[in-house]
Each structure stands twice: as structure tokens, then as C-alpha cells.
Image (tube, rainbow, N blue to C red):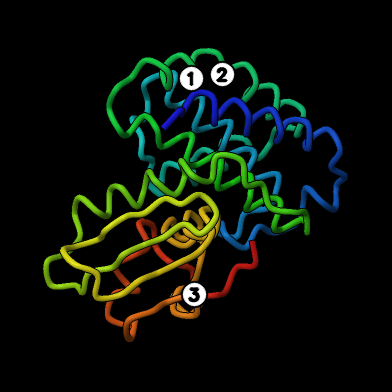
Amino acid sequence: MDSARIYQNCQNRLLQLAATLDADQLGTVVPACPAWTVEQVYAHLAGLAADVVSGDVTPPAGDDVTARQVADRAGLDFDTVTAQWRDSAPALLDLLATQQRRRYSLPALDVWHHENDIRGALGLDVQTEDADQLADFPLGGLAKGWPAEAPSVRVLATDTGQEWNLGTGADLTLSGTAHELARAVTGRRSLKQILAMDWAGGDPAPVAPFLPTLPAPEADLAV
């Protein structure tokens, strides 16, 4: 995954969006996140960048760490938070470009999904750039570690032509756009929504719980 480029493009778009947001929009709750507002999602992004650059956090960050990142910035005005995020970016981008370990792609995964989380909360159109890479990262991981007891799944991205084989054979087939697949397997679709996707070959209920690489939300998410 081209982590540095993806991260930089997402950050640029989010900082441009930040300059247009009013108080009501900043206070909008983001359903995909743990009851965070839009402003708090930016605080998390600024905090994660600073923590990774300083070496205080090696990705991934647990819920206690992300909660601390938000709490640490609760008393700061929004412009200060976005300035902190901007200031951490050059060193973080260097890490993302030079570190070979898979875990150093996680900040790019995080910011891409949070950009869509924010856009969804604000009623904006989805951002699909690099969805092919954001689908391949988790699905490639699932393909390498698919549970032996689970039925096999052939996953097809209808817009990019990508294909992943989860397990041996193809008991079931799951089709969707790269964006929808990326969201589904990264904790942005409820199990109900995953079951309602385009399946063929049988009942997806036995495999649906194995697909999310982050906990699936209880409530449906629109974007």
C-alpha cells in the first residue's frame, strides 16, 4: 500500500474541509467512532500522528490510547489541533514511506476511513480514491489467515476487477465495489449490512462474523 501518499492526500483533503466547518458541524457526532464529534476525530488524528512520530505509540493504537489522544486536546481550540496535525505530518510521512513493517500502513488506513466517517456524518459524498488499496490491505490479510473452520469465500471488487480467495475453494462469493468491501471488512458495516451485500453460493451467516478486521458496529452505517 502506498501509505505515505494515501495519508498525505487524505490529510490535505481533511485540512481543506476543516477550514470550512462551523461550530455545529464540528459538534456533529460521527456514528462510526466511539461517540466522538467531528472535532474529536480530528483530535484523534492529530494525537495519533504525534504519538507515532514521538515513538510513544507503535501502530495499532488501542481504545485507551485513542481516548487519551482526544482527552489531551479537549481544551484546545480547533485551529490549534489542526496545526498540531499539520506540524507532525512531515515526520510521519517519512516513517510511512520508509518503514517496511505492515503495521506502519495502519495510520493511512485509519485516516482514509476517518475521512469517510466524517464525510458520512456531515452528509457529504463518499471519498473513493485509493479504495482498491484500502480493500486489498485487509482482504489480503484475511486471505493469509482465514480460519480453517470457516467456509471459503471468493471476494470480487466489481469496479476494479480485484479478487481475493479466503480459504481454499469458493463455497461463497461476495461481490461489491472496492470502497464498499473496504468499509465492510474494516468495521464500518454492521453484520446485518454485511449479510445484505451481494452474496452467491449459499448462506453467508457462518462467514460474516469473520470478515470485519475491526469490530462491526451494532448500528448500520450509511457511508
Instruction: Give the secondary structure at mark 3.
Output: loop
What x and y, as percent, mark residue 160?
51, 49
Q: Which of the two marks, 3 or 1, is nearer to us in this view?
A: 3
Q: Is residue 21 above or below residue 86?
A: below
Q: Which mark is residue 213?
A: none
What x and y, as percent, mark residue 159?
55, 54
Question: How many marks on residues?
Answer: 3
Looking at the image, which residue is at 64% across and 39% down? 42
Tell me the residue that label 1 is attached to.
92
Question: In terms of depth relative to the viewer, which is nearer, 110 or 159?
Answer: 159
Please give left or right for residue 183 compared with residue 60 in the image: right
For disc 3, the neighbor class at 10 Å (few under 14, some 14 to 19, many from 20) is some
Tell me the residue that label 3 is attached to.
197
Residue most extreme to the left: 148
Looking at the image, which residue is at 36% across and 49% down? 138
Work out which quarter of the rendered image holds the N terminus and state it.
top left
Q: Earlier in the sequence, mark 3 or mark 1?
A: 1
Instruction: Give the secondary structure at mark 1.
Output: helix
- Amino acid at dot 3: Met
Instruction: Report the Cα–Cα distance between label 3 and label 1.
Output: 36 Å
For the residues bearing labels 1 and 2, Cβ distance under 8 angstroms: yes
- Amino acid at dot 2: Ser
**Quarter residue 164 falls in:** bottom left
Tell me the residue that label 2 is attached to.
88
Instruction: Report the Cα–Cα distance between label 1 and label 2.
Output: 6 Å
Q: Earlier in the sequence, mark 2 or mark 3?
A: 2
